[in-house]
Amino acid sequence: MKYAFYPGCVSRGGCPELYPAAVKVSGALGIELEELKDAACTGAGVLPQNISDPINARTFAKAENLGLPIMTICSTCQGVMLQANHRLKSDPEYRAKINKEYLAEEGLEYKGTVEVKHLLWVLFEDYGVERLKSLIKRPLTGLRVSPFYGCFLRRPPEVVVPTKAEAGRKTYLNDLIRILGAECVDFSGMGKCCGFPIITANEQNSLAMVGKHTGEAKDKGADCMVTPCPLCHLNLDGNQSKAEAQEGRDIGLPIIHLPQFLGMALGFDTKDLDLKRHLVSADAVESKVNMLT
Amino acid sequence: MDVTFKVYRKDPEKDNKPGRSNYTVDVAEDSTIMDGLLKIRDEQDGTLAFRASCLRGYCGECTVKANGRSCFTCTAKVKAFTQKGPEIQLDPLRNMPIIKDLVYDWDAFLWNKIKAVQPWLEPGEPASNGGKPVTESEMQDLRKVMSCYYCGLCDEGCTVLPVDFDFLGPAALTKGYRFVFDPRDTAGKDRLKLLEQSKGIWDCVHCFEATEHCPRGIDPTKRIMDIRDKAFKVGISNERVARHHKSFAASVKESGWLDEGRLAVESEGLTNIKGLAALLPTAIKALIRGKAPIPYLHSKRPGADRIKRIFEKGEKDNK
Amino acid sequence: MNEFDVLVIGGGATGLRAAIAAKGAGASVGLITKVHPLRTNSALAQGGLNAPLGKDDSSESFTSDTLLAGDGLCEVDVVSTFAEEASKEVLWLEHMGVPFNRSQGDQLALRRFGANSRSRTCYADDRTGHIVLQVLHEQFQRAQIPAFEEWFVTSLVIDDATCRGAIALSLRSGKFDSFAAGAVVLATGGFTRLYSPSTVSIGTTGDGQELAYKSGVRLMNMELIQYHPTVYPGKQGLLITEAVLSEEAQIVNDKGDKLEKLKNSPRDKICFAMNEMMQNGSGSLFLDLKPLSKEKILSQFPQTHELVRAVAGLDVTKELVPIRPVAHRPMGGIETNAAGQTSIAGLSAVGECACNGLNGAGRLAGNTLTESVVFGKRVGEAASAYAKGLQKKNFPSTQLSDEEKRIGGLISGQSSQDSSGKIHAELGELMNGKVGLTRKGTEIQEAQSRIQNLRVRYSKLRVKNTSKIYNYELTAYLELGSMLRMADAVALAAQARSESRGAHSRVDFPDKNDVDWKAHTLVRLVDGSPKLEKRPVSSAR
């Protein structure tokens, strides 16, 4: 299993614990990664499409030249790329225009054959649940975990679930929690927005969303929340104390990155998963996990 | 067949508290939920309040949640909801203010928000025949957007409305799109400014819930993103957002990827002492944990010059 | 109390256009509507609106086609005016933002629709009504005209043979209020809910006709009800635009035989032919859209595809759709002159609630929306001119409390075995069966006596719901009252017209009789009973 690895900006910026965890865990799983070192930011829905589509087309062309599918570790990267790829694949005239006006100069051409998948989807669709189960060294029994997908891993529907075969994408994270032996604590905000996109434009609303979702999961008895998106992590973890102050309640819910969560079940020493970097202390989770073996 | 409808009730002339009434009614096999409600109101309880108009799925009036699923009572077949048993629970849409029973306060939820985007074309000088030169593909796009029948389902799915009811919402913003992208509209930048106001397009989290909920495939989220893209090209009038977008674009253009530290600082504004000071507590905590990207100490990616070329080309096209 | 120069009653396409025009002509305008404008029956219109815009077209040709469909009962001057103004009005709509389909660059696409001899129907996919209505509502809001939404007009205020305004009930607050106006414009739509099945929204119950009729105004050509040929029957008829017939769709029977030779015929002829086929053992009839490609259906008829699936559970790209002629629109209504004026000073009517002689005995397909905007504008402007020239008079203030008492007297709180719904269901079936597509004197007579029985039942009925806010039982009761009176008028006129012309088909009088019946029927209330009068069609120019 080999992928062109696209780590995104935040996994080495505001969430520097994510990149090493992702690389280590992929290694342990036997997923070979060839990093797209000169690929650029997807635009994250901020850059206008007429600039971000060429940038992403370039990334796709590079992966295509390697003959590899792309793997992402961020819901936002995944979503933006998936939508861009959809546009480039479904409109050959548009793709030809981008190739001609932007990529040709670099000697690149995107032919429209690349698949882009988040690690979460890779596990279920390419890697295989049975193979994953065989590598679990430390089932996370007794750990109560709430899933938080990140919007772009669930929507828009025609891009994320193009056929019935992909319908499982709506529940992979819930399923993974159970597969790794933990208890899945459902809550109504699982697939909703963390508020990160409006942290600049409307901090009040953004923090209200953080408070709402982490608060609800906490009230339902979750020990922690797991998310496949570092931008969600930045808001849910990084701004959780601000949200507590605004909403007038204590929450203190640790937020775990997906690769860290996998690493715990695969038997990694929790020290190697960089949980200490989080702003909301994950010590309670670490102790709970360390008691299991 | 006998069906029991368990209908949400709320009476402003009594205690105005949510309640429920159960009605068992005999309806034909191929009835709609609307048929059931009309029969109940006619034969059992004339006080039951709900709206109805076109009876056939044209007008968007009769949205409701039946057994938790959003639908139109006039096209929802009773059979489809009684597979697990002869009961249908009817509730209002989420986020919806209620006047009485299933009569929604559409003014507060929708009509007033649409009014706030100045929902009319400002036509220019009259032309003699066929109007200004417009293309069929522009008109086709507008017809798609105008197939909206104001059913409120996009607003119901919206992630922002539950935390901020004053957010204009996808329905009103999509109505804004209809004018921004109508080549015959002369309101131009003023219209964009209106949509960029507080509670407008920059308050949208582009979570795509609206797109997922729209029964007509209008893709409201994309429409909002398109307005934002246009504002970016023309010049964003919301200052804070403008700083954020400018900074984001600048660091990707220069280095190929995002300098988050720079973004946080420049979004506040380099002379905004109060705003920058407010960042400090989180920034310090993050520094201690080893999580803070130091602004401006940001390496260039290989291939950054290529990205710069793409930006330059794209920006030229925007002019 | 509310005061306006012009009060428009009815918030559909016609009412909105009239209000915009009246405001534009300098009057102060208020609009009352019992449902929100965007939920009105206008939203159901689909196929398009006619205008002689094509190079090979002319207002003369348009006039001629309209007269032909009207089968001798049109007022020629009204038709000529209409044909001359149509293009200007349709282009006004485009200018205000209607995204009509285009062809060859930016020319308005024109389709050949129904019995139009030229391609002259502009359209916006198959949602023309929905889209035109939105643009009218947009411009209505731009004109900053106060709208009283979900207010139900219960009576007109007539004083000294002049209309002075109206009294209305707010559904939201449950309170009554008076509306004083120099000119009242009724634009309340048709009354086809009288028939079951029909193609219309639940509120299309002839309220405006009833208001005018009660005040002594005559109802004209009430017997002329247009049935639409391509309607999926169900409980609520789902109309499929005949534009599909212009695009290779076919009407077939269950053996697969096609109903040929009916392309570009007037609607009534298609309906009669279909009816005959069904009665002669042809079995059910179906609409076959398969000759159109899937792409064409999805791009040109997206709403049809969507709603046939939602209502009938059928996929028009693959399956046949059962159809039958179903009651659609009246040609008749409140008698008015070309400027929309009724016999009562200060009271006008326009659109589907009115009869100004445009549609004769058969409405040309595609004329309805054009009629809305052409006459909506003319009548709105005329009302404004009239109102501005008036001397101020005191509004008869006791009317409000009288009306409150009257309506209050209808509410009793006591239950009964009978109900509005039961009476309405029987009425609808009766009208469709006995005063429907084809008629016979003995059957109409039977209908007339049964209508009387229903009216007696209705007079005994009271409203049980005593709540003030959103009392739909009360409004349904009032609407039924309108429909029963319309039934009376329709039956009387149908009985009187002893000939067959246009949409009115008498099995016992199968021929057209220009000697006796090139005339309009007029029904007026005299001492509480409907009396019939006649008025010959004005001579042609």
Image (tube, coloured by chain):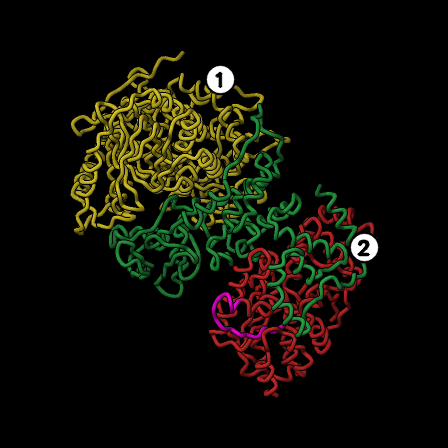
Chain colours: A red, B green, C yellow
Q: Give the range drawn in magenta.
A: A243-257
Residue located 67% across and 50% down the image: A49
Q: Quadrant location of residue B134?
A: top right
Secondary structure at badge 2 equals: helix
Image coordinates of residue A8 in percent, x first then y, are: 70, 64
Q: Quadrant of the C terminus of chain A?
A: bottom right
Image coordinates of residue C332 in percent, x first then y, are: 33, 28
Amino acid of disc 1: Glu
In this view, A169 is above or below B13? below
Q: Quadrant location of residue C484?
A: top left
Amino acid of disc 2: Asp
In this view, C368 is above or below A173? above
Q: Nearer the viewer, residue B82 or A258?
A: A258
Find disc 2 in the rendering and name its residue.
B305
Image coordinates of residue C171 in percent, x first then y, are: 30, 45
Q: Which of A289 and C231 is in front in this view?
A: A289
Find disc 1 in the rendering and name its residue.
C60
Q: Is disc 1 in the same subunit as disc 2?
A: no
Q: Nearer the viewer, residue C294 or C530?
A: C530
Q: Quadrant location of residue C385?
A: top left
For disc 2, the chain is B
